[in-house]
Image (cartoon, helix red, strand yellow):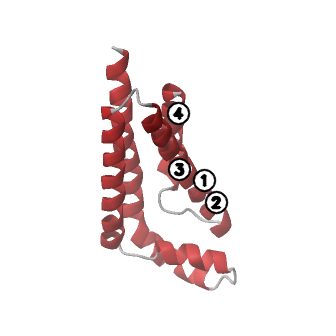
Amino acid sequence: MYQIEVYNAIWLFVVIFMLHDFEEIIAVENWAKRTESRITDNSKWISKKIWQFWNVNSYSFAKRDVYIFLTMSIITFIKIQNVESLIISILYLSFLLFVLIHNVFHVLQTLILKTYTPGLYTAIFLVTPYTIYLLVLLT
């Protein structure tokens, strides 16, 4: 029974993270249009770099996310096939820590720009809590 719950929890992470990616895809174009003048007038180079990263259309951003989805799916599949492997567990836990760092960047970008950035809400309220739950479950 325990193994089935672990397998489901690991696979559910892919779904949770894709919900985060959907928020980014849906919000990215309108966000870039709404914040362009405010960001490009800002003299901070870091603000301009952040805006340049997000200044893409939804189609281009979705193409990026396909690679993220494929990578995440492969990592998850390998973990599911090797649940008891120590080396795979270390690699998967490293991946989860990377996701937490990714979420910290969402918060930092928002603080630097002093405005919402795409993906912020799901990063804070969905992905971060679920990632912490998985880390606790798997350690």
Instruction: Indicate the amino acid at tag 1.
Output: Val
State the separation of the CA atoms marked 3 and 1.
10 Å
The earlier-in-sequence mark between 4 and 3 is 3
Residue 62, relative to residue 126: is it above or below?
A: below
State the separation of the CA atoms marked 2 and 1.
6 Å
Q: Mark 1 points at which residue?
A: 104
User: How many other residues sit within 10 Å of disc 3, few (<14), some (14-19) or many (≥20)?
Assistant: few
Residue 63: name its quadrant.
Answer: bottom left
Instruction: Indicate the amino acid at tag 4.
Output: Leu
Position of residue 100 measured from the top left corner of the image (x, y, whole percent): 55, 47
Residue at horizontal 65%, vertical 75%? 46
Q: Nearer the viewer, mark 4 or mark 2?
A: 4
Residue 101, relative to residue 55: is it above or below?
A: above
Report the front residue among 12 and 73.
73
The earlier-in-sequence mark between 4 and 2 is 2
The earlier-in-sequence mark between 2 and 3 is 3
Q: Mark 4 points at which residue?
A: 135
The earlier-in-sequence mark between 4 and 1 is 1
Residue at horizontal 31%, vertical 47%? 74
Kindly state the secondary structure of the residue where label 2 is placed.
helix
User: How many other residues sit within 10 Å of disc 2, few (<14), some (14-19) or many (≥20)?
Assistant: some
Q: Name the residue under label 2.
A: 108
User: How many other residues sit within 10 Å of disc 4, few (<14), some (14-19) or many (≥20)?
Assistant: some
State the separation of the CA atoms marked 4 and 2.
22 Å
Q: Can residue 34 be seen in this view?
A: no
Residue 48, relative to residue 15: is it above or below?
A: below
User: How many other residues sit within 10 Å of disc 1, few (<14), some (14-19) or many (≥20)?
Assistant: some
State the separation of the CA atoms marked 2 and 3.
15 Å
